[in-house]
């Protein structure tokens, strides 16, 4: 049975929840999380992207008992037809065949390889599979993705194909959802999400990000909040709490939560000052909001570039610990 798929049923239960002052929604009996060995590929010596974090996250989640082996699923790989839902044929075929112009490939940030193509398609498949699972269970996550800088005709910022855009458009084409919302709390603004989906009346994109951080030409979202360098827990959480009602008023059938941990004070690319506890409170606020109002939520991993990278992995583990506490 789908998780409160009927919008009127979700509204009724949310109203009862508020009147009783507690959460009355049933938790799912399972948590399905998606991971592929294809998420990690070899990069040239000295490359600045911390590719090993994906494998480290899976291993650490298992070691700490936050996620169990029976809760991990391989999503396979997306098809060319899938990614064409959000990207131009010229760009998709250029990626698939390795024939993008050198300047386009450098803009992505990774050298072309067959393994990069497979990784990119697996990442999209993880988002699609996790979205199906979220619609059935109320919650699901992908241990990669959140490739929100990928534009319709170009990749950039280590993003090849836009997983959230592809998944949103596929769910809509199949009639599984009518309205979707994106809560993007990665420190970098999701210019690709907004370029592909931002003109649609059936998608609400909320992005809270560093004002002076990448990308330096931001594409307007439905709701953008620009944060000054050094923003800490108190201000961040206050702004987030004030913004979530806009999502509720939009009444989405699903929320894509871009839960990047690069706002962490230890992040090499973040320029914000959130603590581990601040990120935990952030995740509790977003996920409890989704649960209380009966809105299925799919979590995309997003960014994290701490030095040492163990700080990123620990923060991402905390996100899944919160998810299990809220939903299971």
Image (spheres, rainbow, N blue to C red):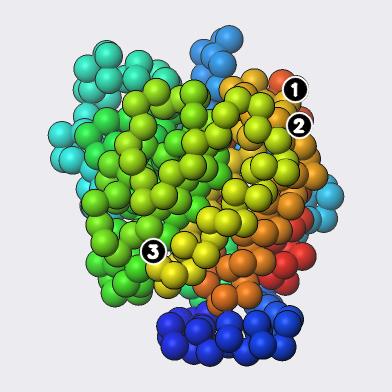
Disc 3 element = strand
Furthest toward the left, the residue is 90
Q: Position of residue 5 (x, y in %)?
A: 45, 81
* Quarter that holds the C terminus: bottom right
Neighbor class of circle 1 (other Cα within 10 Å; few <14, some 14-19, many 20+) is few
Q: Is residue 191 visible?
A: yes
Q: On residue 308, which mark appears?
A: 1
Q: CA distance from mark 2 to mark 1?
A: 6 Å
* Cβ atoms at labels 2 and 1 below 8 Å apart: yes
Furthest toward the top, the residue is 46
Foreground of the two, 195 or 236? 236
Q: Is residue 60 visible?
A: no
Q: CA distance from mark 2 to mark 3?
A: 31 Å
Q: Residue 46, located in which quarter of the rendered image?
A: top right
Return the residue at label 2.
311
Return the residue at label 3.
180
Q: Earlier in the sequence, mark 3 or mark 1?
A: 3
Q: Position of residue 248 (x, y in %)?
A: 49, 69
Disc 1 element = loop
Foreground of the two, 34 or 22? 22
Residue at 34% of width from left, 26% of height from top? 217
Foreground of the two, 65 or 28? 28
Residue at 55% of width from left, 40% of height from top? 186
Left or right, 96 with reference to 28? left
Q: Position of residue 109 (x, y in %)?
A: 42, 20
Left or right, 211 with reference to 165? right
Q: On residue 201, which mark appears?
A: none
Q: Residue 108, located in which quarter of the rendered image?
A: top left
Residue at 38% of width from left, 58% of height from top? 204
* Cβ atoms at labels 2 and 3 below 8 Å apart: no
Q: Earlier in the sequence, mark 2 or mark 3?
A: 3
């Amino acid at each position: 049975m789908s998780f409160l798929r009927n919008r009127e049923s979700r509204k009724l239960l949310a109203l009862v929840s508020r009147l009783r002052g507690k959460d009355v929604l049933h938790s799912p009996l399972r948590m399905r999380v998606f991971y592929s060995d294809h998420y990690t590929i070899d990069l040239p010596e000295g490359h600045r992207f911390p590719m090993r974090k994906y494998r480290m996250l899976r291993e650490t989640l298992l070691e700490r008992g936050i996620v169990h082996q029976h809760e991990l699923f391989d999503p396979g790989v997306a098809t060319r037809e899938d990614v064409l839902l959000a990207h131009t044929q010229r760009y998709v075929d250029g990626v698939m065949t390795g024939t993008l112009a050198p300047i386009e490939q450098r803009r992505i940030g990774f050298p072309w390889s067959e393994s990069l193509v497979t990784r990119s398609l697996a990442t999209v498949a993880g988002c699609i599979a996790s979205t199906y699972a979220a619609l059935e269970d109320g919650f699901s996550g992908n241990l990669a993705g959140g490739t929100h800088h990928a534009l319709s005709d170009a990749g950039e910022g280590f993003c090849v194909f836009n997983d959230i855009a592809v998944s949103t458009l596929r769910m809509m084409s199949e009639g599984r959802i009518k309205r979707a919302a994106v809560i993007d709390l990665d420190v970098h603004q999701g210019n690709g999400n907004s370029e592909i989906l931002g003109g649609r009346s059936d998608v609400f994109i909320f992005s809270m990000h560093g004002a002076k951080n990448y990308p330096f030409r931001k594409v307007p979202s439905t709701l953008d909040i620009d944060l000054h360098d050094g923003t800490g827990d108190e201000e961040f959480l206050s702004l987030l709490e004030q913004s979530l009602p806009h999502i509720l008023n939009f009444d989405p059938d699903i929320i894509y939560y871009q839960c990047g941990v690069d706002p962490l004070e230890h992040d090499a690319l973040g320029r914000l000052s959130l603590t581990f506890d601040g990120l935990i409170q952030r995740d509790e606020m977003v996920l409890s909001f989704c649960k209380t109002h009966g809105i299925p939520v799919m979590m995309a991993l997003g960014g994290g570039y701490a030095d040492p990278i163990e700080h990123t992995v620990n923060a991402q583990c905390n996100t899944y610990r919160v998810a299990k506490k809220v939903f299971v």
